[in-house]
Structures are given as structure tokens and as C-alpha cells.
Amino acid sequence: MNTQTQTNPQSKKETVPASIVWFEIPADNVERAKKFYGALFGWKIEKFPEAVVDDYWHIDTGGADNSPDGALMKRMYPQQPITNYVLVPSVDEAAAKVEKLGGKIMKPKTEVANMGCFVICRDPENNEFALWEKSENMD
């Protein structure tokens, strides 16, 4: 299985590994979840400055620079799953490919100031995931 996200050879964007770079854990009780994950894994969990939603907390997993950090957030709807963000060179191209392969776009392209943009998707097996494009790759 190819784990690389390929780009058009005529594109100036480099091939980017399709790696998980961020995750979000929804919780009904954020304080309880902070205590649980902090005690279980030793993660440092602090309020995320300038978050666009309330109760959004940065999770420092304490791993090497290339290991993903994540966020803890207030659950937005019943059965909201943990969402993994996968790095791609272009969310527009990857989102089009998701639909071509039978997936669905659940939340359209959304920009995160000075960081990048994302699209929330659902695969044909009803699993949600997100595509993430770093701002330095944005047109």
C-alpha cells in the first residue's frame, strides 16, 4: 500500500507523506477528560489560545517533534468520534479525490488563521477524518 500522497508532476508542491499530524478528542465533560488523559498518558493539556470554539484545549503528547499533538474539545454532537487530521499538499485536490472514491465532505474547507486549512470527510465505511494543509502550502 502506498502511504504517500502524490501530487501532479507539473505542480510546484512537493510530495507530502500522508501522515497523521493532529487529532481531536471530543468530550461531554472536558474537565473529566483532561484529568483522565493527563493521568493516563502524562499529557500536558492547556487552553488553546485564540481557539475558534469554546472549550478547546491543546494536548502536548510529549513526543518527538514529528509525533502528533492534538486537542480536547467539548463534544459538538452525539456520537462525535475522535478525528485524525492527515497532512496533504492540497485539501482541494484531496477532497475531490475523497468524493471520487465514494467518500463525502462533511465540513467544507475551513481556514485556521496563520496555520492552514482543513476539510472534514467521511469514508465509505462511515469513518470521519480530516485533511490538513499547512498554510505555507496554500495558494
Image (spheres, rainbow, N blue to C red):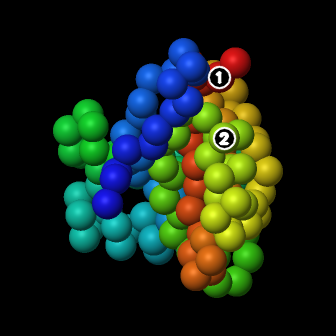
Q: Is residue 99 visible?
A: yes
Q: Which mark is residue 123?
A: none
Residue identifier under label 1:
138
Q: Residue at x 28, y 44 (%)?
A: 67
Which SS class for mark 2?
helix
Which SS class for mark 1?
loop
**Between residues 19 and 95, which one lies in front from this camera angle?**
95
Q: Residue at x 58, y 82 (%)?
A: 125
Q: Is 73 above or below relative to 88?
A: below
Q: How many marks?
A: 2
Q: Is 89 above or below relative to 54?
A: above
Q: Residue at x 23, y 58 (%)?
A: 42
**Between residues 49 and 71, which one lies in front from this camera angle?**
71
Amino acid on which disc 2 is placed? Glu
Q: Is 62 above or below relative to 7?
A: below
Q: Which badge, 1 or 2, comes first in the chain's sequence?
A: 2
